[in-house]
Image (cartoon, rainbow, N blue to C red):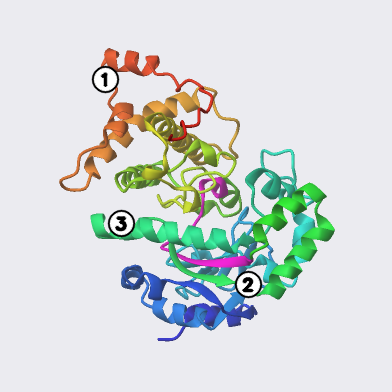
Amino acid sequence: MTDPLRRHAERAGFAEAPADLTFDAERDHPRLVGAVAHRCPPIRAILAGLRRRLPVARNAGEGVTGQFYRLPGHYRSVCCAIPDLGDPERLWEGDVIVIEGAEPLMPDFDGYLRWMLSTPFPDSDLPIGLHFPLVAGTPPGAAPLDECEQAQRLAAALHERHLTLYGELARAPVPLAVHRCSAEDTARYIETLRWRLPRQAFERAEARVRKGCGVSVWHYPAAPIRVDDLRILAAAAPHLRAAPEAGEETIAGWCRQFSRLLHLGFMPFAPWNAGRGSCVDPGSACIDGGFADLFTLVPFDSIPDDRWFRRSLLDSVRRLSQTVSVFAVSLGAEPAGPPDPSLDSLTRVFLGPRLLEHLETEMPAGAALDSRISSCFRLDRLEDLVAASAEAPPPFLPYRPAQAAE
């Protein structure tokens, strides 16, 4: 079978970089590749091509180039629609390969960085190029190799568990490959930052990529249009605006995936990831009902205690509720105006019973709902609320070294 990714890249005039894969899903997680192949038969040919060459776009401009497109706000990822449907209006249909982190390999990266340093990041006082290193803790327009590898391992673990318990892949990106950028490419990227960034931002960014830059390649079963993208895209292409009845399906998908994450032992968000986002945020929740950006998922066994567990769960629900609020505004007004001040409260009322229903219906056979989860969703006795109100963080006690054995 021919490799459609390579064919689409050649038609779009893309360059190529010799591949150096540190993660290969067919080698490391063959069961996941088999599951993807049921939906996307060319996936093995695509992986074979990725072992030789990595497609690299000529520039980082938003918009469509052949079968490739960069969605607004996707600062370090480009998508390729695999089915060749012959109609640019249908690029949103069918399976997608997402290439994340290849921007430093592009010929126009210096111009792209200058644009990032002169363009404000949404809801921030900083430009994009400074927001990433100083607030999000990530280098602008690039991905550290260790972050790529960690994200792929975490996503693979989620999909393996999901496949075992639910018999299908999660509605989330499936990791395919991680490419290690050459030492020369990483050094060139660092030198570009050195000339462009203020010292404090440069030092933080340089520290994250000192061990190398990476490129991640993912499969997603549809165009990864996020809630934050919807308003922008719908203004340019009104047919992309979802109707409320379709929106119900989207929210049901989010509730289903949120519940399954919990049953699989993953928390969508924990407070120590503040500033880095979560998969349930408007910038990561996709309008097909799936979640992207799994890097900040938190395994239950890494949460220190029950108090932090509850706080993380309630914060995760609050973030999903905010996403539903933004989604509702995007579905309604044209153009969307400021939301009603009571919308957040109404959304939590709307979301609560739906989440509880999915927590029950998505529970694996023979399993019971984790008591720490049920204490947040089934708080139906006053005495339980009183007990929760009486909980306090442990007191601060100075460290007392143990007595040396005599």
The residue sitting at 54% across, 23% down in the picture is: 341
The magenta-colored residue range is 212-230
Residue type, numbered disc 1: Asp
Q: Indicate left or right for 73 with 30 as reference.
A: right
Q: Indicate left or right for 304 with 39 as reference.
A: right
* Residue 246 coordinates in the image, percent (x, y): 39, 47
Label 2 and label 1: CA atoms lie apart by 54 Å
Q: Quadrant of the C terminus?
A: top left
The residue sitting at 42% across, 52% down in the picture is: 288
Outermost residue toward the front in this view: 406
* Label 3 residue SS: helix
Mark 1 nearby-residue class (10 Å; few <14, some 14–19, many ≥20): few
Task: From the image, tell me which residue sits under label 3.
Answer: 161
Q: Is residue 58 visible?
A: no
Label whose residue precedes the other's in the sequence (3 or 2): 3
Label whose residue precedes the other's in the sequence (2 or 1): 2
Relative height, residue 377 to residue 243 (above, below): above
| Pair 1/3: label in front | 3
The residue sitting at 51% across, 22% down in the picture is: 396
Relative height, residue 264 to residue 144 (above, below): above
User: Is residue 28 or residue 11 the one in the foreground?
Assistant: 28
Task: From the image, tell me which residue sits under label 2.
Answer: 181
User: Is residue 45 or residue 349 the one in the foreground?
Assistant: 45
Q: Quadrant of the N terminus?
A: bottom left
Label whose residue precedes the other's in the sequence (1 or 3): 3
Tags 1 and 3 touching, CB below 8 Å: no
Label 1 and label 3: CA atoms lie apart by 32 Å
| Pair 2/1: label in front | 2
* Label 1 residue SS: loop
Task: From the image, tell me which residue sits under label 1.
Answer: 380
